[in-house]
Image: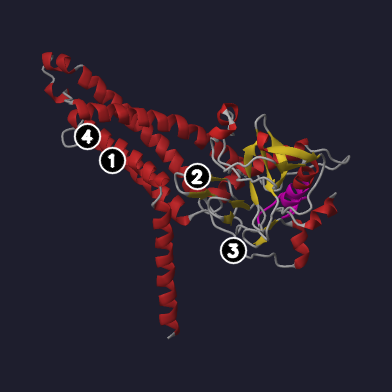
Amino acid sequence: DGGQTMEVQRQEGILDTMVVVCNRLYHWGPLTALFIVFFIFLTSLHVTSMWWSPYKYTGGAINYVVFLTWVFLLVLNFMKALGVGPGFVPRHWRPATAEEEQFLQYCALCDGFKAPRSHHCRKCGRCVFKMDHHCPWINTCCGHRNQASFTLFLFFCVCGSIHAAVLLTMGLYKAYHKKYYIQKKQMDDLVHLRFFPLLATVLSLGLSIGVIVALTGLLYIQIKIIIRNETTIENWIVTKAHMRERELGDEFVYPYDIGVAENIKQVFLKKLGDGINWPIVAGTNQYTLTVEQIMQKADKRLRTRLYSVINPYNGSCFPLTQGCCVCLSAPLSDEPRVKISPGDQVLVSRWKTHWLYGEVEARYGKKKKRKGWFPRKCVVEVSTGAFSKGFTDDTNDSSKKYR
């Protein structure tokens, strides 16, 4: 009976995983990515088969094998990055001892503490282990469990796109000089492209070049942060840590950079760390970075200002009713816009000429915090300086111990 129960649980686990994969896959990002991949793939094969057939030439057969290998590895790592996911902190998670809670940030949305290196993703709705960023193309975050697959996906995308761009360029060249090859009676090199195949070939070449340009930059960033053993978010925290005013002799040391070779092994060869506990540099501890982040958020609260809402804003990205200047200067980020109504109070922490970013005070018994951008002209300042009473925050009260 015990064996049957374990088998049923294993089958349920497989079914749950399949449901998660299907839900992530059924999204404009992954579907668009796969469409681009197979569009370039099929167009390249069609054009190349006219002048370098694998059935006639040994080089053509080798070319096909190499090209198919790029595509296979690309799709394999894409599905692994999407299916495995970054790894999520369990809901209601708490550290082993109550004493450790003072070193961690509390996530009200997950009703639990954030593990070291973890951050809450608004799109996933969960706290993510070693979160780097949320990627719309895999419809989940890049993090602890899928960073290797995501990086390899980028690498094979770039390799396959360079290969495809060369093949498509050669095909277009031969199609354009078709009369020359006919005059030379080189009939094996003829490429016949009617209007729609020609249009598809040009579009495919443009997509290939676009993929090369965009993903090469992203691949460079991923390699750089892997070598340093830090995420994009942690890079920003470390930058602010070195800029923050400190007491004499108090120097911040990033705890996770254990050497280039070990950093690379940690991502690609063996998962050092379970998402909660990590190998660290001597002289630091598991909470060095989280304590630094708590301190930075405490400093941030001291810089905030309280505003009161006088005009409503519906949360749209381009609020035409607020004027052209507001629409044209909308923040270029994936951060949310927050709906506000007259009478609301907002604790503002970031300022732009026509936009402000802040947290809306909870009213009418609502506990869920609302953060985002809103037009500056909808509010008036109430006070300057710190004002945090009545507002929720990611950090716990114990952060005061570090000041």
Between residue 101 and residue 354, name the one nearer to us.
354
Residue found farthest to the bottom: 1
Between residue 222 and residue 124, name the one nearer to us.
124
Amino acid type for the residue under numbered disc 3? Pro
Q: Secondary structure at mark 2?
A: strand
Q: Position of residue 5 (x, y in %)?
A: 43, 80
Tag nearer the camera, 1 or 3: 3
Q: Which residues are magenta?
A: 278-295
Q: Which mark is residue 46?
A: 4
Q: Could you give the CA–CA distance between mark 2 and mark 3, rounded to whole angstroms?
A: 21 Å
Q: Which mark is residue 135?
A: 2
Which callout, 2 or 3, points at the residue further toward the start of the chain? 3
Amino acid type for the residue under numbered disc 2? Cys
Q: Could you give the CA–CA distance between mark 2 and mark 1, rounded to whole angstroms?
A: 30 Å
Q: Could you give the CA–CA distance between mark 1 and mark 3, rounded to whole angstroms?
A: 43 Å
| Label 1–label 4 contact, CB within 8 A | no
Q: Secondary structure at mark 4?
A: helix
Which callout, 1 or 4, points at the residue further toward the start of the chain? 4
Residue 351 within the segment the image draws in magenta: no
Instruction: Give the residue number, with chain letter if any, for mark 3.
Output: 90
Which callout, 3 or 4, points at the residue further toward the start of the chain? 4
**Quadrant in the picture for the N terminus:** bottom left
Label 1 CA crowd tier, 10 Å (few <14, some 14–19, many 20+): few
Amino acid type for the residue under numbered disc 4? His
Residue 42: quarter of image: top left
Which callout, 4 or 2, points at the residue further toward the start of the chain? 4
| Label 3–label 4 contact, CB within 8 A | no
